[in-house]
Image (cartoon, rainbow, N blue to C red):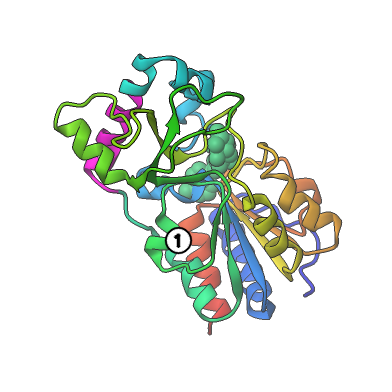
Amino acid sequence: MPVGRVTLADDARLAASGARRLGEALADARAGVAFTGAGISTESGIPDFRSRDGLWSRYRPRDFSFSRYVASPQVRVEAWRRRRELWSRPPRPNPGHLALAGLERAGRLAGVVTQNVDGLHQAAGSRRVVELHGSSRFVMCIGARPRAGTPAGCGFRAGQDWALARHEAGEADPGCPDCGGLVKSTAVSFGQNLFPGVLDEATRLVRSADLVVAVGSTLRVHPAAGLPAAAARAGVPLAIVNDEPTSLDEVADLVVRGRAGRVLSAAAVLALA
Ligand code: APR
């Protein structure tokens, strides 16, 4: 799939030509993999982390760590308050998510590897979604005093709505109904180990790809960012769609500087024409 060298699109016209070249690459793909980050969900109203007004410009990442969550009732209470606030108006998939789902249905993409926990790829219709950093759609018992970043719960697991309903009923820090342990979102926090098998599944998907399209990520957080990097080293064409430079621009075959929703929608129209 001749993608050619890097195209840095620095205005709408160039972004359109980048989207065209991405569309051509996707038209030839039969086992493409989308690798997504928080930037694909900002157009659904969910802030990303490292943009100028991202979450890390307002909060300290260490306040979101697994050990702080386990140690501090205040951190847990604040975490549930924020979740209830965010999910009081459930975010919806945007054109970027919908474009990727359409490309999977048409057989251009084999699936999505995402760093996001918002479930918007699945809500858009994507069927094969590997959630490297877990999912905020569920909660689980992590036990009373889990250590070293590994949940040690009794097996209780429920939809996030269970916890939000308990919070709404006045339980500021919902506990496990079966064992009394701590309850936490199944989104993986800083300092928490990835769930077993997830990285292997993502690695298998990327290794069998004939195109990797990284969308809306600074590509700075490992081990996740190691996946598109390894694909590029293995000679798999790498395209990047992002509205600012990323850590892998230098090794990408195509870089499209633009908004994910617009670029992916335009590229999908071309790829499916
Ligand atoms: N279109 C294109 N790019 C966008 C858009 C958009 N609509 N909105 C934001 N971006 C870009 C930002 O400019 C930024 O470069 O998306 C990128 C998002 O990068 P990060 O905020 O670093 O998010 P991500 O790469 O997903 O972070 C990885 O870090 O904090 C941890 O666990 C967290 O999964 C997350 C991981």
Describe residue 183's horizontal placement relative to residue 255 as left or right.
left
Q: Residue furthest bottom?
A: 273
The amino acid pointed to by label 1 is His
**263 relative to 168, above or below:** below
The x, y position of residue 232, in whole percent, is 80, 56
Q: Residue furthest left?
A: 169
Helix, strand or loop status at disc 1: helix
Describe residue 40's horizontal placement relative to residue 218 as left or right.
left
Whether residue 220 is visible to the viewer of this picture, yes or no, is yes
**36 relative to 22, above or below:** above
The x, y position of residue 57, in whole percent, is 48, 23
- The part of the chain drawn in magenta is 78-90
The x, y position of residue 23, in whole percent, is 61, 72
Q: Which of 224 and 10 lies nearest the eye of the viewer?
A: 224
Secondary structure character of the magenta stretch overall: helix
Q: Which of 116 and 58 lies nearest the eye of the viewer?
A: 116
**Which residue is at 52% across, 20% downward?**
67
Provide the residue designation for mark 1: 97
Q: Which of 15 and 167 lies nearest the eye of the viewer?
A: 167
**174 relative to 40, above or below:** above
The x, y position of residue 38, in whole percent, is 50, 44
Describe residue 162's horizontal placement relative to residue 56 as left or right.
left
145 inside magenta stretch: no
**Which residue is at 38% across, 58% downward?**
94
Q: Quadrant of ligand 1?
A: top right
**77 relative to 236, above or below:** above
Describe residue 17's horizontal placement relative to residue 127 as left or right.
right
87 inside magenta stretch: yes
Label 1 neighbour load within 10 Å: few <14, some 14-19, many 20+: many
